[in-house]
Each structure stands twice: as structure tokens, then as C-alpha cells.
Image: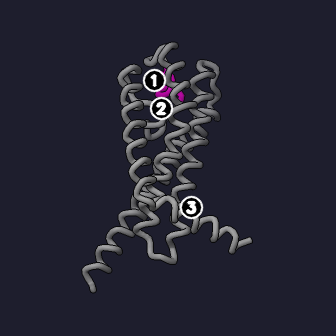
Amino acid sequence: MQSQLIKILTRLSGRLVQRNILLASGLCMVACLFGFQWLKTQLGAPMLDELQGYDQMALREHLLLYGESGRLLHARFTLSLDMVFPLVYGAFFGGLLAVMAPRAWAPFSPLAVLAVMLVDVVENIQLAGLLYGFPNLSEAQIQLASETTQAKFLAIQFMFLWLLGLTVWRVYKRFRR
């Protein structure tokens, strides 16, 4: 079972490091970011998943600011573009991590990104529930969504630090020769 998993991860990381996959996922990531920027312009405020945590009062303030049509638009974006986005950045950063990782670690690099992607998808589902459920939201629902958003930020920071560490290690090894 373990060797089968390693084979699958090796094949996945091998595909992610291909130049056309990195380029396409990078370009798609930029396109998604333009979509999110357009949404923020329409909402007149940051998206919920950009907030570093919130309580019932802060969430209510944002949801009222969006208005009914803004909440609906945000929910649609959350269940469409924001559900595709983890796949796009997952391919891009999974490929970068696999490129920078030592050869023995490369197959396991996508696992770090997969954890971030999973937290992001769970967060998107929770945010859609908040957007569609407003104003009938429980304190527990709001707290769980806020904590998931905070967990996503921590996971992203870990992924970036891991990538930075691998990059520094790779540069160090190159100049040490």
C-alpha cells in the first residue's frame, strides 16, 4: 500500500513539474485573482475568506455591507471560482515544491499543498453556508468558519515558508559546489 502511494505521488509530482503545467496553472492562478479582484470591486469590501477571523458582529457588518445581491454573488463565486482556485494553485505550488525539493522528497511535496487545498475547500463550503444562511446563523457556525479561515492562513504560511526554505536550501547547495 505504501509503495503504491509513493508511485502515485511520484507520478503526480512528475507531471506537476512539467513546464506547460506550471505555466498553465500559473496563468490560471492570475486569471482567478483577476476574478476575485472584480468580485471585491462589486462587493465594495474584502471577501469573507480574506478576513483574518471574525465574530458575529464583524461578520454581520460585512454581510450587510454586501447587500442581498452581493451576498448571492459572493456565494456563487465561492462555489464556482473559489472551488476551482485550490486546484489551480495546488498544481502551481505543488510543482514548485517538487522542483525545489530534494529528489527523495519530491514525491511528498504535493502533500503539503493538498492539506492547504483541503482546508480551503472546507472553508469555501462553510462560507457558502454563511452567505446563503444569513441572517439565521449560529454562533458555533460563525466561529467554526472563522477558525477554518484562520487555519487556511496558517496552512498557506507554512506552505510558503516550506517553499522558501527549499529554495534557500537549493541556492545554498548550488553555490556550495
| SS assignment at label 1 | helix
Label at residue 48: 2
Q: What is the distance, in whole Å, between disc 1 and disc 2 at their CAs?
A: 8 Å
Labels 3 and 2: the sequence-earlier one: 3
Horizontal arrangement in the rendering, residue 78 relative to residue 8 (left or right): left
Point out the frontmost of discs 3 and 2. 3
Q: What residue is drawn where x is 47% and y is 18%?
A: 70
Look at the numbered discs 1 and 2 and tell me whether their residues touch, using CB distance below 8 Å. Answer: yes
Label at residue 12: 3
Q: Which span of residues is magenta-colored?
A: 56-63
Q: Which residue type does callout 3 highlight?
A: Leu
The residue labelled by disc 1 is: 62
Report the residue that reaches farthest toward the right: 1
Q: Position of residue 11 (x, y in %)?
A: 58, 65
Q: What is the distance, in whole Å, between disc 3 and disc 2 at their CAs?
A: 32 Å
| SS assignment at label 3 | helix
- Picture quarter with the C terminus: bottom left
Q: Quadrant of residue 102?
A: bottom left
